[in-house]
Image (spheres, rainbow, N blue to C red):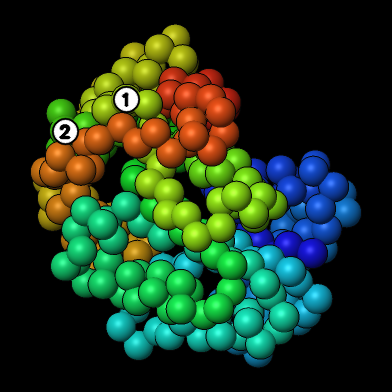
Amino acid sequence: MIVVTGATGNVGRPLTQALASAGEQVTAVSRHAAEMPDGVRHVPADLADLQGLTPALNGAKALFLLLSGDLHAPEARPTDIIDLAAASGVRRVVLLSSQGVATRPLGPSRIAMRAVEEALSESGLDWAVLRPGGFASNALAWAESVRTQGTVAAPFGDVGVPIVDPADIAEVAAACLLDDRHTGGIFELTGPEVITPRQQAEAIAAALGSPVRFHELTREEAKAAMTQFVPPKLADDTLDIISAPNPAELRISPAVERVLGRAPRRFNDWVARNIAAFH
């Protein structure tokens, strides 16, 4: 049995579906009740509450670990989840980390995530680490403003990075959970092209067949919006990257193609699959 945390999210949902379609027994963990694929067991749990997480791990052979925003807070102890997994008999953990662990190692949130990576590598478990860059699905934050105002609002409109499709992250995660060949691997995951926020807005407009206006936010405006969902330090770390990506953050990684045997999906592919959200 494989446990998927963050199972209702942009990575966890397609990962849960992929594992279930492969015939695996899956336990999906999320904070709130949600509809799941046939045959998938759902356990509502908060990862910050180890007692509540314990029932989900009973009988599990593998765990996909996605840390929620509050587990990046200074007082959080996400490494306790790895200890709990090992004590519960889990033999393999695939951790969703961040590209910034390597490209911005001194950022406070990156230091904390590196500690989780190191705890996992020293745990005695089989493991793999996924380090994606920016997610294509972050564009869903614009869905309401596109629907109601025909507008995309974002900072640094002409600064691009090679954002990755969460479906690609999910497929790589499934491969790492199921295939011993990927054990001990650290996989930097990007899309196939550098794309700016303004170009993303243009792609959404093209898919809709109607104009979408781009409005550039200041850094302060963007941080105020982001801190509704993530800790301020994590927001600052993210804004540092998207305002001035360094050469490592602009690099197109070959990892998706090496693991999956195909090129990573383009942003336009993600838009085509999710265009209903913008209508």
Check contact, mark 1 vs mark 2: CB within 8 A: no
Which residue is the site of mark 2?
A: 159
Q: How many marks?
A: 2
Give the percent coordinates (x, y) of residue 14. 64, 44
Query: Given the current orientation, which residue lies at the most extreme front position?
Result: 181
Separation of marks 1 and 2 at Cα, in angstroms: 13 Å
Q: Say which amino acid is labelled 2.
A: Val
> Which x, y percent locates residue 88?
71, 84
Instruction: Kindly state the secondary structure of the residue where label 1 is placed.
Output: loop
Query: Residue at (67%, 72%) from the top-left corner?
Result: 91
The residue labelled by disc 1 is 193
Could you tell me which residue is drawn at 37 percent across and 18 percent down? 203
Q: Is residue 7 above or below residue 156?
A: below
Q: Amino acid at mark 1?
A: Glu
**Residue 59 visible somewhere in the drawing:** yes
Label 2's element? loop
Q: Give the quarter of the figure containing the N terminus.
A: bottom right
Q: Quadrant of residue 253?
A: top left
Q: Quadrant of residue 197?
A: top left
Residue drawn at (81%, 53%) of the image: 24
Which callout, 1 or 2, points at the residue further toward the start of the chain?
2
